[in-house]
Amino acid sequence: MAVAATDFNGKKVQEIANCAYGTEIGITNTGACTYATGCSLASLATDARRASSTVKFTANVTPAKKDAATTKSKAISKTSFTAAMTKAQTDLGSAYASVSLPTISTVAAPTVTEPTTSGASSTGFSMLTALVVLGATLRLQ
């Protein structure tokens, strides 16, 4: 079965994946799928070849969380992200219980972008970008 980006973008599975990624890098509040003050996360799936989609997660992280988030993002594996998605599905509640979670086939190394500085000021965040490939066994409801 082909997995289209339209089966991810704007769907409950995207909310689950965002919560999972945010939790994995340590920018969500403990036990909740809300982001710590000053942090945010977005994702976008694009169609890939061979019945899969590639999801790009982009996190804005405060300077206080930057080092830990960078370290944690480099440690994400297929296994840890799958477990994080299962936990996120539970944390989000019963409205998400029937969502079929995708099979994670690849987790790429993240890219960290430091803010540009102008004189003594900076934008105050770092951007972490990671790619996750969702495999062909994705079934969404």
Image (spheres, rainbow, N blue to C red):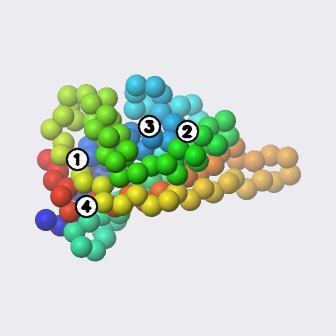
Q: Residue furthest top?
A: 31
Q: In this view, does 3 lie to the left or right of 60?
A: left
Reading the image, the residue beneath label 2 is 39
Residue 111 location, x and y as percent? 56, 59
Residue 38 location, x and y as percent? 59, 36
> Mark 3 vs mark 2: which is more N-terminal?
3
Reading the image, the residue beneath label 1 is 101
Quarter of the image that includes the N terminus: bottom left
Q: Label 4 sits on what residue type?
A: Gly
The Cα atoms of the two marked residues, 3 and 1, are separated by 17 Å
Reading the image, the residue beneath label 4 is 135
Q: Label 3 sits on what residue type?
A: Thr
Closer to the observer: label 3 or label 2?
A: 3
Name the secondary structure under disc 1. loop
The Cα atoms of the two marked residues, 4 and 3, are separated by 21 Å
Residue 107 visible in image: yes
Reading the image, the residue beneath label 3 is 23
Q: Label 1 sits on what residue type?
A: Leu
In front: 111, or 12? 111
> Mark 2 vs mark 4: which is more N-terminal?
2
Residue 5 location, x and y as percent? 28, 61
Residue 83, image quadrant: top left
Name the secondary structure under disc 3. helix
Q: How crowded is mark 1: few (under 14 residues within 10 Å), some or many (20 or more)?
A: many
Residue occupying image coordinates x 63% and y 49%:
126
Residue 85, image quadrant: top left
Q: Residues within 10 Å of mark 3 (few under 14, many from 20)?
A: many
The Cα atoms of the two marked residues, 1 and 2, are separated by 25 Å
The Cα atoms of the two marked residues, 4 and 1, are separated by 10 Å
